[in-house]
Amino acid sequence: GYHFYKDARLRRITRYRYNNVPVDMGGRYFYINDNGTIWAPGWSPVKTELDGYECRHGMGYTIIKGTKNNISAEVTFFVPQNYNGEIQKMTLKNEGGEEKKIKLFSLAEWCLWNAQDDSTNFQRNFNTGEVEIEGSTIYHKTEYKERRNHYAFYTVNADIDGYDTDREAFLGLYNGFENPQVVAEGKASGSVADGWSPIASHYMEITLAPGESRDLVFILGYVENPVEEKFNADGSVNKSKAHAMIEQYNTVE
């Protein structure tokens, strides 16, 4: 999936590579590690054969559901009206007769720089990446302090057991999106991006009794602040709009 705010050149929220192979690789994913069996609800990018798969597109929403080894993962994607963010409502369910302990990883690859830089002064992008972790929210604030008045965030309405914000630390050397090192090892590394390629990945350990389900709400959001309201009195980033957006969709009700 690909996200941008109004301008696909200057406001790419998630990464899009114009000559990508395959063309739709990258964006945001969910990975599940079930006792060493690694799969994704949408099949891609892991490409593990699923026991069941559904994809439904409606007016303003998409639902993707994958099932593997008696675990079902259904994700509903939609963008509410007058809301600068995408809601990703995930429902995990144990459809078997035994307790399940799984490890869930989210992934969004950030991108707020000029798309033209991907083909010209690309090395500059490796010097600008900046993130901030606040509870279960990961902020992408590249160049916010220097010359931008906008940032992005990725959050989930539950406590997390770890995170990663550096792409190379998450994927591992010579790995691609189909086989991230962190997912294979079953534990987040806690990386904090300082330049290079920033990402947002939440790590959660989830236990489900037979027949039990659990709902999670992930929000991928975008915020613009007036120049005179970029910072709080203590010099920190003004996150009031982000906090309000998170609170608005903090439950499945």
Image (tube, rainbow, N blue to C red):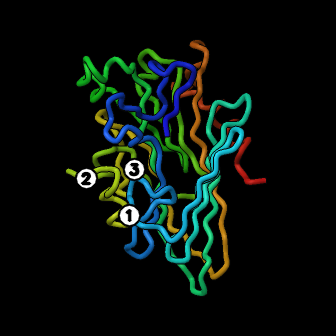
Image location (x, y in percent) of residue 40: 46, 60
**Looking at this view, is 193 or 216 the one in front?**
216
Circles 2 and 1, Cβ within 8 Å, touching? The answer is no
Q: Is residue 157 visible?
A: no
What residue is at 57 percent from the left and 86 percent from the top? Answer: 98
What residue is at 74 percent from the left and 31 percent from the top? Answer: 81
Amino acid type at image mark 1: Lys
Image location (x, y in percent) of residue 248: 74, 41
Residue at far bottom of view: 97
Q: Say if 21 sits above or below 208 in the image.
A: above
Mark 3 surroundings within 10 Å by alpha-carbon count, few (fewer than 14), some (14 through 19), many (20 or more): many
User: Marks 2 and 1: which is nearer the front?
Assistant: 2
Residue at far top of view: 228
Which residue lies under the disc numbered 3? 164
Mark sitting on residue 65 = none
| Quarter of image, res 84 | top right
Mark 1 surroundings within 10 Å by alpha-carbon count, few (fewer than 14), some (14 through 19), many (20 or more): many
Q: How many marks?
A: 3
**Which of marks 1 and 2 precedes in the sequence?**
2
**Looking at this view, is 35 or 135 the one in front?**
35
Which residue lies under the disc numbered 1? 187
What residue is at 59 percent from the left and 22 percent from the top? Answer: 224
Image location (x, y in percent) of residue 52: 54, 68
| Quarter of image, res 86 | top right
Image location (x, y in percent) of residue 171: 30, 51
Mark sitting on residue 175 = 2
Amino acid type at image mark 2: Asn
Q: Is residue 221 left or right of residue 34?
A: right
Amino acid type at image mark 3: Asp
Circles 3 and 2, Cβ within 8 Å, touching? The answer is no
